[in-house]
C-alpha cells in the first residue's frame, strides 16, 4: 500500500469511526496515525469516563472499546479494499489500572489476513508502549455483511457440511 492510499484510508477511517460509531464519538476517540496494517488512537482523559470515583481510574469498558476499535482500523488498513468486518473474538489482558488524568493511547497491528478472518494484536498505554495498561488479541470476520446460503457457507468451510 503506498503513502497516498494509506492517507486516504486513514482519512476514511477517521470519518467512519467518528460518524458511524456513536460510542467512539461520545468518548472522544481520535485516530492519531497509521500505516499499512497498523494504527494508533487516543482517548482523552475525561471525568465522565471514570469507572471508580474513589480512584479516578477510567472504566475498563473504555479500554476494551478503544482496543476493539483500533484493532478494526488496523484490519481495514491491511485489506486491499474496504469491507464490513465484525469482531469474532477479543481477549483483553489487563496489566494495571490506567493512571487518572492521563490520556489513553492504543496501538494495533493486523499481523495475518486469511480469506475470511484477520488477526490482530493491540496495546493500551499512556506514554510508553513498553509499559502497557492492557494488551489484546483479536480475530475479525471479513465481509461481515455478506449473505450466503448455508450450502455456500459449507462450501467455503465457514460451517460444517452437516449444518448446511
Image (spheres, helix red, strand yellow):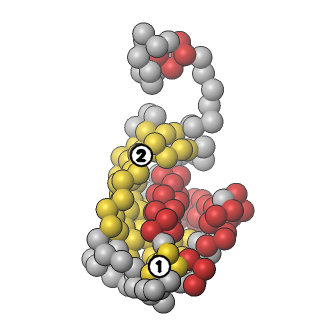
Q: Which residue is mark 1?
A: 52
Query: Does label 2 or label 1 sit earlier along the sequence?
Result: 1
Q: Residue at x 51, y 68 (%)?
A: 62
Counting labels gives 2
SS type, badge 2:
strand
- Coordinates of residue 69 in the picture (x, y in percent): 53, 60
Identify which residue, 4 or 11, lies in the foreground: 11
Q: Which residue is mark 2?
A: 89
Q: Residue furthest front?
A: 54
Instruction: Specify whether 34 is left or right of 5.
Output: left
Q: Position of residue 12 (x, y in %)?
A: 65, 60
Residue 92, relative to residue 28: is it above or below? Answer: above
What residue is rendered at 70% in x and 57% in y? 20
Position of 82 with respect to 154 (left or right) is: right
Residue 22 appears in the rendering:
yes
Mark 1, other Cα within 10 Å: few <14 / some 14–19 / many ≥20: few
- Outermost residue toward the bottom? 101
Q: Would residue 94 appear left or right of 45 to someone viewing this image?
A: left
Residue 77 shows in the view: no
Q: Which is in the foreground here, disc 2 or disc 1?
A: 1
How packed is label 2: few (under 14 Cα within 10 Å), some, or many (20 or more)? few
Q: Assign a secondary structure to mark 1.
A: strand
Q: Name the residue at 62% across, 75% down.
A: 28
User: How far apart are the alpha carbons under marks 2 and 1?
Assistant: 27 Å
**Residue situated in front as seen by the camera: 73 or 61:** 61
Q: In the image, is residue 125 above or below residue 36? A: below
Amino acid at each position: 500500500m503506498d503513502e497516498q492510499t494509506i492517507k486516504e484510508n486513514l482519512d476514511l477511517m477517521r470519518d467512519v469511526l467518528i460518524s458511524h460509531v456513536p460510542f467512539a464519538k461520545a468518548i472522544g476517540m481520535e485516530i492519531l496515525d497509521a500505516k499499512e496494517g497498523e494504527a494508533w488512537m487516543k482517548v482523552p482523559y475525561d471525568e465522565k469516563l471514570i469507572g471508580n470515583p474513589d480512584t479516578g481510574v477510567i472504566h475498563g469498558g473504555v479500554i476494551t472499546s478503544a482496543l476493539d476499535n483500533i484493532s478494526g482500523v488496523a484490519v481495514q488498513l491491511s485489506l486491499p479494499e474496504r469491507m464490513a468486518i465484525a469482531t469474532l473474538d477479543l481477549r483483553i489482558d489487563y496489566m494495571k489500572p490506567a493512571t487518572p488524568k492521563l490520556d489513553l493511547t492504543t496501538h494495533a497491528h493486523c499481523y495475518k489476513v486469511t480469506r475470511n478472518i484477520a488477526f490482530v494484536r493491540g496495546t493500551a498505554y499512556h506514554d510508553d508502549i513498553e509499559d502497557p495498561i492492557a494488551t489484546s488479541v483479536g480475530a475479525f470476520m471479513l465481509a461481515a455483511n455478506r449473505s450466503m446460503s448455508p450450502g455456500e457457507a459449507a462450501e467455503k468451510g465457514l460451517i460444517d457440511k452437516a449444518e448446511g
